[in-house]
Amino acid sequence: MKTVTGLFDDYSDASAAVSALEARGIHSDNISIVSNNADGRYKDGDHDSNAAEGAGTGAGIGAVVGGAGGLLTGLGIMAIPGAKDSIDEDTFEQILEMDDDDDREFSKSIVYDFFTQAQSTFEKMDANLEKKDLKTLSELGHFLKGSSATLGLSKVKDSCEKIQNYGLKKDAKGDKDITEEEGLKKLDETIKQAKTEFEEVKKVLKKFYDDES
């Protein structure tokens, strides 16, 4: 089998190259990366390689990550396409800091509980939108805004804040009054937007946790 190598200045460029290869039909099992790990930055999913050992640990070249999933987990969530636009890195890293050194089970349980919570909340939003219950919609927006903010899911958080404000018959920023009719129209649009943003960030998070289901 032919081997092709590339050199990248940072992991975002490497991630983009991985995505391009996958788009061309190259399976992730056939993609690997060697990264500079002098500061111990990359841990999860990393495996020492013979090549790295040959180069010597003093050079700081460790971490050969086999497969795109392992690559993206090892380099961090922001290496996954779509993460930069939808996740606040600092906030999410605080969640990851609660994990044990050898697995991500604790943070994964929190994230997957949020998936269930968000799905249930969106169903309640749909039901209350049909009933035109703006007060309850505002409360649901406030609730989901808080839980999404805890994980650093910035796009979902921002949309939920708008839902909270529209339910109070305020504009998106909560500064100006709007009519009930305007509020309902904005709520319908923003709930749909929040659902889309949720599904997009859910895909990013599942990829981070190597969940292909």
Image: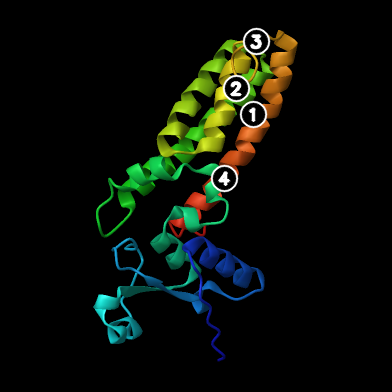
Q: Is residue 138 above or below residue 95?
A: above
Left or right placement of residue 101 versus residue 15 in this view: left
Q: CA distance from mark 1 to mark 4?
A: 19 Å
Give SS at disc 3.
loop
Res 85 label: 4
Residue 124 is situated, as x and y percent measured from the top left of the image, at 57, 25
Of label 3 and label 4, which has the lower sequence position?
4
Give SS at disc 1.
helix
Of label 1 and label 2, which has the lower sequence position?
2
Res 163 label: 2
Q: Amino acid at mark 2?
A: Ile
- Which tag is nearer the camera, tag 2 or tag 4? 4
Q: Residues within 10 Å of mark 1 (few under 14, many from 20)?
A: many
Q: CA distance from mark 2 to mark 4?
A: 20 Å
Q: Are marks 3 and 2 in contact (CB under 8 Å)?
A: no
Residue 199 shows in this picture: yes
Q: Residue at x 46, y 41 (%)?
A: 88
Q: Is residue 142 above or below residue 34?
A: above
Of label 3 and label 1, which has the lower sequence position?
3
